[in-house]
Image (tube, rainbow, N blue to C red):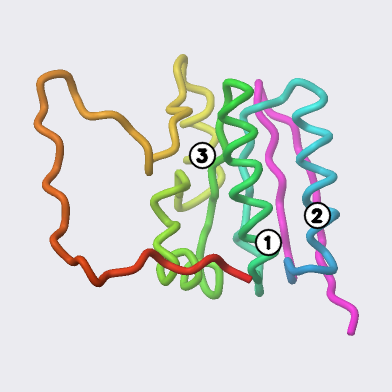
Amino acid sequence: MTTRLDLSVRRHEGASVIALAGELDKLSGPRLRDAMVTQLDDGVCRLVLDVTGLRFCDSTGLWIMLEFQRRAVAAGGCLRLAGVHGVLGRILAITGLAGAFSLDPDVATSLRAVSSPAPDTRSPAVSSPAPGARPPASPSAPDAEPPSGAG
C-alpha cells in the first residue's frame, strides 16, 4: 500500500513552516524527518508544522513530532503545531500528549508566536512554576498508569 504525503517548506523570518497534506505514517515519516533535519542543519530552529491538510497520522508521525520538539528546544528554538484536527487531534488527546506541544489554530498564529522577541521554547509539559508558587498537588490515584507508548 502506498501512502501519499505532500510536504512543502517555506522560510519566514527566523522560522520555517513545514506544511503537510495527506498521510503521515511509517512509509512517509522519513520525508518529514529529512525535512526537519535539513531545517535544523541550516540553523533554523523555530519550526511550525502546518498539519491543517493532514488526513491521517500514526504513531510513527507522533514520534517524529516528539523527537523534533525535543531537538528544536535543545537548539534554542521550538516546534509549534498549527491547525491540529481530526485523527492527530484525537491521538494527542487520547495519549495525553497535547500538552507536550504548543498548539495554534493556524499558521499565522504560530508565526506570530515564533516571531516574538523571546518565543516560548519550553515544552508546556515541563514548564516551571512562578517564583513563590506552590507546586500542584499530586493526584492520588495509585492504580493509575501513564499512557502506554504509541507503537
Where is residue 31? Give x, y as percent. 85, 54
Q: Which residues are magenta?
A: 1-22
Is residue 9 rendered magenta in the image?
A: yes
Marks 1 and 3 sit apart, C-alpha to C-alpha, by 20 Å
Marks 3 and 2 sit apart, C-alpha to C-alpha, by 18 Å
Is 143 left, or right, of 106 in this rendering? left
Look at the numbered disc 2 and give the secondary structure of its residue.
Answer: strand
**Circle number at residue 7:** 2
Tag 1: amino acid: Gly
Is residue 15 rendered magenta in the image?
A: yes
Tag 3: amino acid: Ser
Where is residue 18? Give x, y as percent. 71, 45
| Front: mark 1 or 3 | 1
Above or below, 112 relative to 143: above
Is 1 left, or right, of 136 in this rendering? right
Q: Pointer 1: what residue?
A: 61
First reached walking from the N terminus: tag 1 or tag 3: 1
The residue drawn where x is 68% and y is 28% is 12
Q: Which residue is nearer to you in this view: 140 or 60?
A: 140
Magenta stretch: dominant SS? strand
Where is residue 75? Give x, y as percent. 63, 23
Q: Pointer 3: what residue?
A: 110
Look at the numbered disc 1 and give the secondary structure of its residue.
Answer: helix
Above or below, 128 relative to 138: above
Q: Which residue is nearer to you in this view: 146 or 84?
A: 146
